[in-house]
Image (cartoon, rainbow, N blue to C red):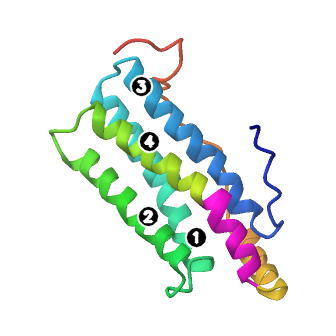
Amino acid sequence: MERKPIKRNENLVPISREHHATLLFCWKLRQGVKKEISLDRIARYVKSFYDDHMLAHFRTEEQYLFTDHSDPKILKGLKDHLDILSQVDYILTSDMGDYENILHLADTVDKHTRYEERELFPHLEKKFNHNELIKIGLSLHREEHTAKEEYDDEFWSTKNNSK
């Protein structure tokens, strides 16, 4: 069954657009493992993505969207964030990391991103009233949301096969 593109409320588009970059992050991690790129190179990329995108993205979601801590769907999103941050921390601080940890992070981030897009955001679009969505949208549009990534070691590329 083919999935139709999700029609996102215009006020949530800036943050939803970042999810494309996040799914690309997961693909890049998987490519690195597939090509047996050194764990150090992959970990440097994880750190760069974490510093430049992931942390700010999570903070924005938590500040504007994940405000009702009695909502089970929101609590799942928050729990996912903690799990992902814990996995990133392990990859960045452990000298015992391996490809399995990288793949687990890619799978967790992928699953979480798809959960937000397919379940949580549609839920929030119904949960927030029109004025709340506009207020959120104005806040999101004031902040810089970019999916553009500038990383100089494209280990995932077929041009860059050195390990």
Which residue is at a point 40% across and 17% down the rendered structure image? 35
- Three-letter code, disc 4: Ala
Gap in Å between the C-alphas at discs 2 and 3?
A: 23 Å
Residue 35 against residue 91 in the figure, above or below: above
Instruction: Name the spot of residue 109 as percent of width and height, x first.
Output: 47, 50
- The residue mark sitting in front, 3 or 4, is 4
Residue density around tag 4, few if under 14, some if 14–19, many if 20 or more, within 10 Å: many
Gap in Å between the C-alphas at discs 3 and 4?
A: 11 Å
Which residue is at a point 37% across and 65% down the rendered structure image? 82
Instruction: Name the spot of residue 8 as percent of width and height, x first.
Output: 79, 61
Q: Which mark is residue 103?
A: none
Gap in Å between the C-alphas at discs 2 and 1?
A: 10 Å
The residue wearing badge 2 is: 81
Residue numbers of the magenta segment = 116-128
Instruction: Name the spot of residue 94 as percent of width and height, x first.
Output: 18, 45
The residue wearing badge 1 is: 61
Q: Which mark is residue 106?
A: 4
- Three-letter code, disc 2: His
Residue 27 against residue 50 in the figure, above or below: above
| Disc with the residue nearer the chain's start (3 vs 4) | 3
Residue 34 against residue 128 in the figure, above or below: above
Residue density around tag 1, few if under 14, some if 14–19, many if 20 or more, within 10 Å: some
Label the magenta part by its dominant secondary structure: helix
The residue wearing badge 3 is: 32
Instruction: Name the spot of residue 58 as percent of width and height, x first.
Output: 51, 65
Gap in Å between the C-alphas at discs 1 and 4?
A: 20 Å
